[in-house]
């Protein structure tokens, strides 16, 4: 493998690493956004539970106030009933009192229902508060992790770009220009293995003579189909390797 090809291979490795780091840096805030959406679900649930619980308490208070009003009304009606001069007046007062008593019973029954509903509502609100607290702790921990990981990735990315500049400076300008052009065309895949006589990227078979030249290359060779830089990586003869070590 020529020094030029080695430099190009290293350049692609650095570019691939930089691409991975950049994608991760961009994806990390999305991860935080996802868990923050989960936190928002817990927050909304707590709000709903609290609103229902508050509604229960407000309705009970209104009913209790209404009972007091009815009781005051009954007291006045009883006072007025003692002053009734006819049976019709007396029955009218009695009917009004009966109506108030019925209204009070209905309110009391409803209050009992609401009190029965209040206990599970309070339990739900408390459970939602605990879940929200736990989720907030997770969100903060995840944010800390993301901030740390982002800082690490940005530092690795800076180092990769710095190393890339050094490697790029060792590559002839025409070769570098071809590299950049192919990298843009094929979304980063610039170099392809041709050990089996075909381009591993586009799968086009090489001309026999061209492949033979590639095997003994002292310069760069390019795929005649896709334009990628080709390299030959001779297979290792394991039996020969084992015998040579004995």
Image (cartoon, rainbow, N blue to C red):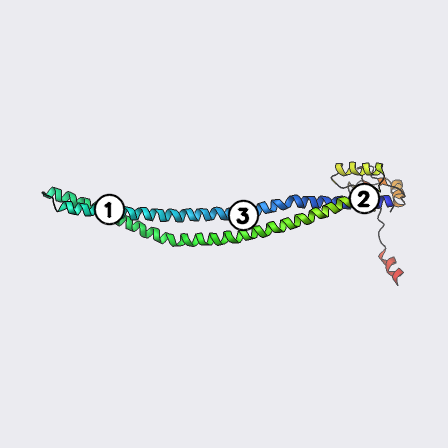
Q: Is residue 128 left or right of residue 143?
A: left
How many angstroms separate mark 2 from mark 1 (CA)?
Answer: 91 Å
Task: Identify the element where label 1 is drawn.
Answer: helix
Circle 1 packing at 10 Å, graded few (<14), some (14-19), many (20+), is some
Camera-nearest residue between 117 and 227:
117
Task: Identify the element where label 3 is drawn.
Answer: helix
The residue singled out by tag 2 in the image is 166
Q: Which residue is at a point 72% across and 43% down the rendered structure image?
A: 19
Camera-nearest residue between 118 and 199:
118
Whether residue 193 is visible to the viewer of this picture, yes or no, is: no
Q: Position of residue 231 (x, y in %)?
A: 84, 44
Circle 2 packing at 10 Å, graded few (<14), some (14-19), many (20+), is few
Q: Which of the labelled discs sits on residue 99, or is there none?
A: none
Q: Is residue 102 left or right of residue 27?
A: left
Whether residue 63 is visible to the viewer of this picture, yes or no, is: yes
Q: What is the quadrant of residue 172 in the picture?
A: top right
Question: Mark 2 or 1 closer to N-term?
Answer: 1
Q: Residue furthest left?
A: 85
The residue singled out by tag 3 in the image is 38
Question: Mark 2 or 3 closer to N-term?
Answer: 3
The residue singled out by tag 1 in the image is 70
Task: Identify the element where label 2 is drawn.
Answer: helix
How many angstroms separate mark 1 from mark 3 (CA)?
Answer: 48 Å
């Amino acid at each position: 493998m020529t020094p030029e090809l080695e430099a190009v291979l290293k350049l692609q490795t650095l570019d691939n690493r930089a691409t991975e780091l950049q994608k991760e840096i961009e994806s990390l805030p999305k991860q935080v956004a996802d868990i923050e959406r989960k936190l928002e679900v817990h927050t909304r649930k707590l709000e709903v539970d609290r609103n229902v619980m508050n509604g229960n308490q407000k309705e009970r208070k209104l009913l209790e106030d209404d009972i007091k009003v009815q009781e005051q009304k009954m007291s006045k009606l009883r006072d007025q009933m003692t002053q009734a001069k006819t049976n019709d007046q007396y029955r009218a007062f009695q009917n009004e009192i009966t109506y108030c008593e019925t209204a009070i019973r209905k309110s009391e029954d409803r209050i009992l229902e609401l009190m029965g509903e209040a206990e599970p509502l309070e339990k739900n609100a408390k459970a939602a508060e605990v879940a929200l607290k736990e989720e907030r702790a997770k969100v903060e921990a995840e944010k800390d992790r993301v901030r740390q990981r982002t800082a690490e990735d940005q530092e690795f990315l800076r180092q990769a770009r710095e190393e890339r500049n050094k490697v790029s400076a060792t590559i002839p300008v025409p070769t570098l220009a071809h590299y950049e052009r192919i990298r843009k065309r094929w979304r980063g895949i610039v170099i392809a293995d041709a050990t089996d006589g075909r381009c591993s990227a586009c799968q086009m078979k090489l001309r026999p003579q061209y492949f033979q030249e590639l095997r003994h290359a002292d310069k760069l060779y390019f795929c005649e189909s896709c334009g990628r830089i080709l390299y030959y990586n001779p297979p290792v003869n394991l039996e020969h390797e084992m015998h040579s070590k004995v």
